[in-house]
Amino acid sequence: MLAACEVAGSAPATAPPKTQPAVAPLVAIGPGADTIDARTIVGKPAPAWDVDWMGATPIDVAELRGQVVLVRWFTEGCPYCKATAPTLVKLHDELGDRGLRIVGMYHHKSDEPLEPAQVRALAGRFGFRFPVAIDHGWTSLRRWWLDDHPGWTSVSFLLDRKGVVRFVHTGGSYAPDSDEALQMRRWIDQLLAEPAP
């Protein structure tokens, strides 16, 4: 089985190739964020996703315009995902009425066959009350991130009300009350304060 939240055969973002240019600190946070060029996605419209929705009406990225959207990839057995789950639940509960939409994307890493019931159970243990989808074969994760940024898979994206990716948490966790969770909240508050298109 793959190590939690890394891609097989690649190091986590803490040891990127030296050829990657640095980015401004307000573009991305997370392990090695200062050496990842997140500009390949930041400032651009969010890519489409190709996923199976778990007990929810399918959601198209374009349908989320007008809302601030936090998309987080997670998986079973990932300590970073487990540590981040309470922050996601808190953000959902506190900011959902103000226009924040959270979307969970499950990417399967186990050698065992994927069982949708286990994904539902994991989302339940995490307390997720927001839409969750299964990203089979990591198709969307690759399109959004891994094709240009091999390493961490426990990545998060913040989209503004126009559907543009504005901020990236490059991987690892943002546990409740951590500096990274506080930064995520500041980013969300900034986007929520911007006028709707």
Image (cartoon, rainbow, N blue to C red):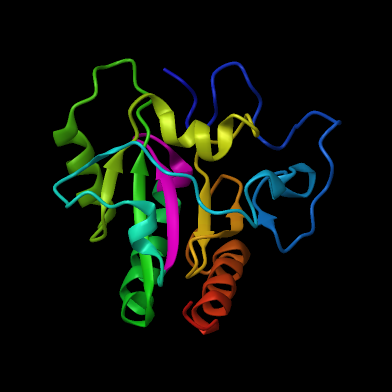
Position of residue 77 measured from the top left corner of the image (x, y, whole percent): 37, 34
Residue situated in front as seen by the camera: 41 or 92: 41
Quarter of the image that includes the N terminus: top left
Residue 152 location (% of width, % of height)? 57, 36
Is the residue 23 above or below the residue 152 in the image?
below
Hey, which quadrant is residue 179 in on the image?
A: bottom right
Q: Residue at x 71, y 49 (%)?
A: 39
- Is residue 171 covered in magenta? no
- Would you say 196 lies left or right of 93 here? right
Q: In this view, does 172 lie to the left or right of 60?
A: right
Q: Could you say which quadrant of the image residue 6 lies in?
A: top right
Q: Give the range drawn in magenta.
A: 68-81
Q: Is residue 98 above or below residue 20?
A: below
Left or right: 18, with 93 as reference point: right
For the point 42% across and 37% down, the residue is 78
80 is within the stretch colored magenta:
yes
Q: Which picture quadrant has residue 190?
A: bottom right
Q: Which of 107 and 53 is in front in this view?
A: 53
Q: Residue at x 23, y 61 (%)?
A: 129
How many numbered marks does the figure carry?
0
- Closer-to-camera residue (196/85): 196
Whole-percent x, y for residue 164 in the image: 55, 60
